[in-house]
Every structure is written in C-alpha cells, then in structure tokens.
Amino acid sequence: DAGVIQSPRHEVTEMGQEVTLRCKPISGHNSLFWYRQTMMRGLELLIYFNNNVPIDDSGMPEDRFSAKMPNASFSTLKIQPSEPRDSAVYFCASRLGLRETQYFGPGTRLLVL
Amino acid sequence: SQQGEEDPQALSIQEGENATMNCSYKTSINNLQWYRQNSGRGLVHLILIRSNEREKHSGRLRVTLDTSKKSSSLLITASRAADTASYFCAQRGDYKLSFGAGTTVTVRA
C-alpha cells in the first residue's frame, strides 16, 4: 500500500507566483482533507472533501486558495498569487468512510520568498 | 483553529523512562485521538479513545480520558530513542479533527 502521496515534497517560489500542490489519497478512501501546519498556528484544517465534493472549506484562508477534487484519486490545492505568509507545510490526509483514522501524506514544504 | 492544548510543550527524558503528556479540550467530543509526527514527516495515528471510555492501552501506550474535566493523557512507557517525536491530540467533533499544538518529546540515549 503506497499510502497518501503528495507532490512536490518541497516547493520554493517567489511571491506572486501560482503554486499547485497535489495529492493522491489511498485507493478506496472517500474522504480527503487538506491541512496547513505552521509554528504559529499549528495544524489547521483547510478543506474537507467527501466523495469528491467539498463539504467544508471554512478553513481556506482567503480567495487566493482554491482546492479541487476532480476524481476519487486526485486532489489539488492551488494558491494564486502566493505570498510569503503562505509558507508552511501542507498535508493531505485521507480516510475510509466513517472510520476514525486519518492517514496523512508526507507533506509539501512550501517556501514563498 | 487549535481546539486542544497540550501540556507540556516539550519534554526531555532518558531512554527507559516513562513520558506523560496531557491534552485539554474545550467542546464535547465523539472521541479523542493521539497522533505522532516524526521530524519532517506526516502524522501517524496512534490510538483512539471514545467518549464513553476512560482508559485504553496499545502496546506501550496508555491513554486516559476524563470528559468531566475535558482532558486526556498519553503515557508512553519504557521510552526508546525512536519515540522522539511530536505528539498531538485531536478531538473529533462531527466529521473533522481539531488538533492541539503538540508536545515535543526527546528521548535521550
């Protein structure tokens, strides 16, 4: 089992550039979560998908952030335009049905200069 | 959006000693979960305790839950160098988890 796959693992970009983070959940999992982790704010839920449908995007910081899940095996988190305060580690996690355990990917470490 | 608070923020112990960390939360829960994060890695689920349970064991892990005090504790017995990590409690409300700030545990050889 490959686990949750995220790409890229590291991203360095300049302010104003578009950033796209990618996630492949565990096969068969129908819930997907995007989190952001920073020293100041800890681990924050950005958006939650169930069966490819966004259920809760109240954690998305602002309109510069958008997320899509076009099919059960792929999701993207896009930041356009990026700002230095977006620098963080972004995690994707998936879950099977109503089971409790979330499985996290290795994260994407984003640095916006 | 941190709903829980872990205590202490950091803990340094000798290999073989026990490590205890606490978590307080604010709202009612369905369950409370503990996760481990090794440096530079994603979170890994350790153990879950339901709101109607008071204590649960898994290997060297022991979790307690006191819903009247809205608190939980995680005990790691006979710690090993490999236990060096950050530990997070996460409260499950409806469908999502709300994570605490974490306790960083360092196990010295």
Image (spheres, coloured by chain):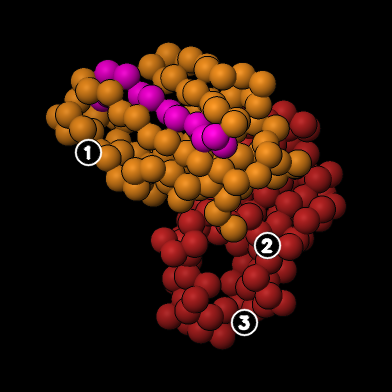
- In the picture, the disc for residue B46 is none
Distance CA(mark 3)–CA(mark 1)? 41 Å
Q: Earlier in the sequence, mark 3 or mark 2?
A: 2
* Res. B12 image quadrant: top left
Q: Which residue is mark 2?
A: A59
What chain is tagged by disc 2? A
Looking at the rendered structure, whether the residues under marks 1 and 2 are on a common chain is answered as no
Residue type for callout 3: Pro
Q: What element does badge 2 sit on? A: loop
* Residue B105 in the figure: left or right of residue B14: right
Asked if the residue at tag 1 contacts the one at tag 3, i.e. Cβ–Cβ closer than 8 Å, the answer is: no
Question: Is residue A11 in view from this perspective?
Answer: no
Residue type for callout 1: Ser
Query: Against A62, is B37 above or below?
Result: above
What chain is tagged by disc 1? B
Residue type for callout 2: Gly
Residue B79 inside the magenta-drawn segment: yes
Q: Which residue is mark 3?
A: A81
Q: Which chain is orange?
A: B
Foreground label between 3 and 1:
1
Question: Is residue B80 in view from this perspective?
Answer: yes
User: Quadrant of the image for the C terminus of chain A?
Assistant: bottom left
At horizontal 52% and vertical 72% (from top left) the residue drawn is: A86
Q: Which residue is mark 1?
A: B12
Mark 2 neighbour class, 10 Å CA radius: few under 14, some 14 to 19, many 20 or more: some
Query: Against A104, is A81 above or below?
Result: below
The part of the chain drawn in magenta is B69-80
* Residue B77 in the figure: left or right of residue A64: left
The location of residue B95, given as percent across then percent down, is 75, 42
Q: Which chain is red?
A: A
The location of residue B10, given as percent across then percent down, is 30, 45
Q: What element does badge 1 sit on? A: strand
